[in-house]
Image (spheres, grey):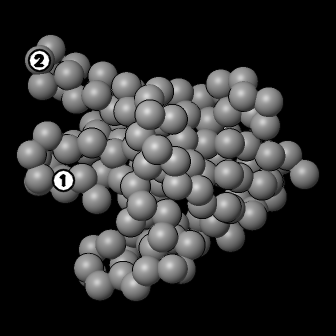
Amino acid sequence: MTKFIVYTDGAARGNPGPAAASFIITSSKGEILVREGLFLGIATNNQAEYRAVKAVLEKLVLKFGNDLPVKVELCSDSTLVVNQLSGNYKIKNPQIKTFVLQIKQLESKVGKIFYRHIPRSQNALADEVANEVLDKQLYEG
């Protein structure tokens, strides 16, 4: 079974404020296969983090659909996202509950997902992509 290691990040300038989501998909050997970011409009940081997870799972279905199911190690520097998606924390926010339901539906298509919390320093590339998207949107418009 194919294994991917993915890194996700969400960023909001202001909370809420202009926001972006980003993800990096790598092979199990660390080769970067996809590096992508998207502007979200106005969102909170938590919303941006969840949108990044949803976006990377959608991309896996779209780009690697013929190879599914796969194993995915999803790395995030958001303790909240990792613990909520792993089932360790309850979800009270109705909008976040909606994101989680959408993510769980995508998980069933993708395969086996393992969520891992990583320090921000190990998520530098995903963070860089999210900030590039924001800078481009805000300063180059």
SS assignment at label 2:
helix
Q: Is residue 47 above or below residue 91?
A: above
- As drawn, is 63 to the left or to the right of 70? left
Q: Position of residue 65 (x, y in %)?
A: 74, 49
- As drawn, is 85 to the left or to the right of 5? left
- As drawn, is 132 to the left or to the right of 86? left
In which quadrant is the C terminus drawn? top left
* Residue 43 badge: 1
Q: Is residue 35 visible?
A: yes
Q: Is residue 100 above or below residue 69?
A: below
Question: Residue under circle 2?
Answer: 139
Bin the neighbour count of mark 2 within 10 Å (Cα to Cα): few under 14, some 14-19, many 20 and up: few
* Residue 2 badge: none
Q: Residue at x 41, y 40 (%)?
A: 120
Q: Residue at x 15, y 14 (%)?
A: 140
SS assignment at label 1:
strand
